[in-house]
Image: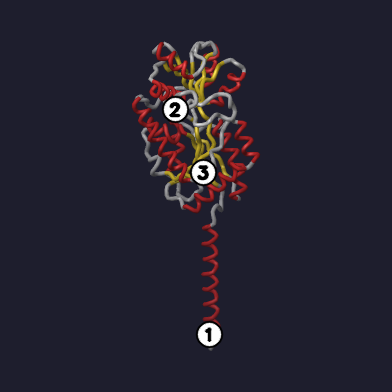
Amino acid sequence: MQRQPLLLALLLALALAAHLQTIGSAAAQVYPSRPITMIMPLPPGGAVDALARVLAEHMRTSLGQPLVIENVSGAGGTLAVARVARAAPDGYTLGIGNWSSYVASGAVYPLQYDLLKDLEPVALLPSVPYWIVAKKSLPPKDLKELIAWLKANPDKASAGTTGASSASHLCGIHFQNSTGTRFQLVPYRGGAPALQDLVGGQIDLMCDLAANDLSMVRSGQIKAYAVMAKTRWFAAPEVPTADEAGVPGIYVSTWHGFWVAKGTPKDVIGKLNAAAVNAMTDPAVRQRIAAQGMEIPPSEQQTPEALGAFHKAEIEKWWPIIKAANIKAE
């Protein structure tokens, strides 16, 4: 008879332990339950780093956890992307990167991961288009005249770039391939010295990130022929697109995105995507992004599936161009 209370107490204890274990397991499954590390493939202080901090500040409110930015620069961004690809697929390592680190790097550097197979897309982020700018004394008045002038003067014009495999370099190659023109590509250590020589007339033109030299175009120090995008750039709506200027299909931009490791649960990706989308709809965030010259993608392009399709299309577009030009890592 005395054994029955003991047995009952034991059963109650086991039931309580099982219940607590169930609660603990459920709590462990709640995402996120700790800070998220955002891997940045560039040093602090640049445009991508600024974008990451603007988004992270708002996303921490949606997710209820801080996003800690870790800058992992070097090797064209491949060190940072490798960290994301090799991370545990739990959503606590989030990669932010751009066209250079998540597309071009794969055609230039030997990778120990696959940019499409080892990563899960989360969200397409804001972008900045490239445009064709030239010294103010260059004779052509519009893009059609520029192409005609370049064809009439093969290999005589010079275009600045920010180095091998840079977007400005590949933009120049893509422009030549698309228009049947030839000109010299002059590498610089950065955009600032290249623009200085463009203003000074030491080089003739440049395919450059539009946000870099908007003030110089506005002040008349250089002139812009066309934006290499499907639509006009909001910051300079008076400049036509290449399509409008008679050279369709030349699209070059520095776009950004979020990725996580392959195998990350869909519901976790969904929460990260929702937080990113929510940030990009906030008026204050949008204003800060616009101040950097960046454009937020349309809502239908902000899904993981849209980024996955776009990422694949960009690799299929740019890798043959890069490999045909025999561009190697510096």
The amino acid beneath tag 2 is: Pro
Query: Which residue is the extreme one toward the bottom?
Result: 1
The x and y percentages for residue 191 are 52, 21
Res. 286 image quadrant: top right
Say which residue appears at 37% left-offset and 32% top-offset: 319
Q: Which mark is residue 89?
A: none
Circle 1: residue type: Gln
Between discs 2 and 1, the one toward the N terminus: 1
Q: Tell me: residue 311, above or below residue 180.
A: below
- Of the residues under marks 2 and 3, which one precedes in the sequence? 2
Please give left or right for residue 328 compared with residue 222 in the image. Answer: left
Mark 2 or 1, closer to the camera = 2
Question: Closer to the camera: disc 3 or disc 1?
Answer: 3
Where in the figure is residue 159, as x and y percent of width and height?
46, 17
The secondary structure type at the circle numbered 2 is loop
Q: Residue at x 56, y 16 (%)?
A: 222
Per the rendering, the mark at residue 300 is 3
Dot label at residue 4: 1
Does the residue at mark 3 contact the one at mark 1 (Cβ under 8 Å)? no
The residues bearing labels 3 and 1 have C-alpha atoms spaced at a distance of 65 Å
Residue 99, how many percent across, how many down?
Answer: 46, 33
Q: Residue at x 54, y 69 (%)?
A: 19
| Residue located 43% across and 15% down the image | 148
Which sits in the foreground, 86 or 132? 132
Q: Is residue 214 above or below residue 266?
A: above
In the foreground, 182 or 166: 182
What is the C-alpha distance between the residues marked 2 and 1? 86 Å
For the residues labelled 2 and 3, the Cα–Cα distance comes to: 24 Å
Residue 255 in the image: x percent, y percent?
A: 50, 34
User: Colour scheme of this structure image?
Assistant: secondary structure
Residue behind mark 2: 248
